[in-house]
Amino acid sequence: MTRNTIGAVVVTFKRPIQLVKTLEAILEQGILQKHIWVINNDIGDKLEIVRTLFPEINIFQSMKNIASAGGFSLGMIKIFQCGLEWAWLFNDDSRPIGGSLDSILDHAETLDQPDAGMVKLANLNKRGEAVLQYWNGRRLPAYVPVSQKLIATDLVTFDACLVSVKMISEIGTCDPGYFMGTYEFDYCLLAKDHGFQIYTIPNGMIEDEKSGSIGGTPPWRQYYNTRNHLHLGIKRKDTGIIWAWMVREAKFTYSILRFQDQKLKRLKLKFYAFFHAMVGIRGKVFDPENS
């Protein structure tokens, strides 16, 4: 693994200021412009600011909003087609800080092994601890002191995650049918099924604005979270995942009834999510902008 074998993917939707900051941060890590792909889900913005500031960066203009699952899937394909060895994935509001890539390259000997599939820089919680993620039918976080160790984990999210092109060639990309939510966990479980290792470096060397989380969870996002988690359990024929889904949904339904706004709308969308998962309806159902 070297800088010249890494390509970056940034999925964006209506956040040009954050996107420019993220591209600048990636370039500061030594990634070449020609090895960066921007997947633009906003059909109304041709990203002229990016074309002007970064003339060698590749921009794919989607003809519809394929969300994060579709965007990362497409980005993985682009990196594979370029003949590079690793795809470094980012949302438009998450970016590496100085020294991020160096901290990964320090582990190149391990990551060059054939079974290395994914490696991510950990996010930090409010207490300054690094967040690791494991799996038992649902996501199980663990909290460790900040360090530069390479730790084997079950799950990673895609912001600041490197994905091996060798693994992409063997198992494919993440599933765009999820639209948003759960696709990362599905892909990690698939990677583990095929014997690939997933690592996390608990150094917190990523800036994440979490722009999509401002103002709480909107009803349409609850729909995708509910549908996709149940779909994952059904797809894998895993009663543990389905049981975890039932417990989780009971807690969230109580929260809706007790604390949240738009109660009727949220409950209605949860019913649709359950029904759609059972009958196999996938992809974009409710538009985030018009729901």
Image (cartoon, rainbow, N blue to C red):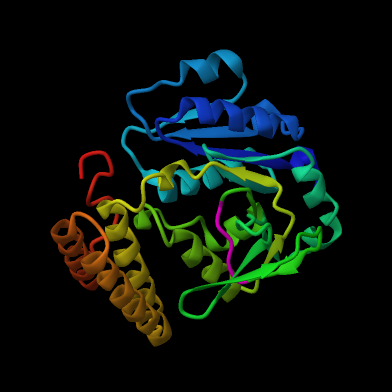
| Residue 222 falls left or right of residue 244 | left
| Residue 15 falls left or right of residue 193 | left
Magenta residues?
154-158
Residue, x 68% and y 43% (percent of image)? Answer: 84
Q: Is residue 2 magenta?
A: no
Residue, x 65% and y 59% (percent of image)? Answer: 127
- Is residue 30 or residue 208 the one in the foreground? 208
- Is residue 144 or residue 90 the one in the foreground? 144
- Figure disc tally: 0
Residue 99, quarter of picture? top right
Q: Is residue 38 visible?
A: yes
Name the magenta segment's main secondary structure: loop
Residue 291 position within the rendered picture, expressed as x and y whole percent measured from the top left = 20, 45
Residue 89 position within the rendered picture, expressed as x and y whole percent measured from the top left = 59, 46
Q: Is residue 280 visible?
A: no
Residue 125 position within the rendered picture, expressed as x and y whole percent measured from the top left = 61, 58
Up-down: is 235 above or below 183? below
Up-down: is 136 above or below 73? below
- Is residue 6 or residue 49 the one in the foreground? 49
Up-down: is 34 above or below 219? above
Residue, x 56% and y 34% (percent of image)? Answer: 37
Residue furthest to the bottom: 239
Residue, x 74% and y 68% (percent of image)? Answer: 151
Residue 146, quarter of picture? bottom right
Residue 14 position within the rendered picture, expressed as x and y whole percent measured from the top left = 40, 30
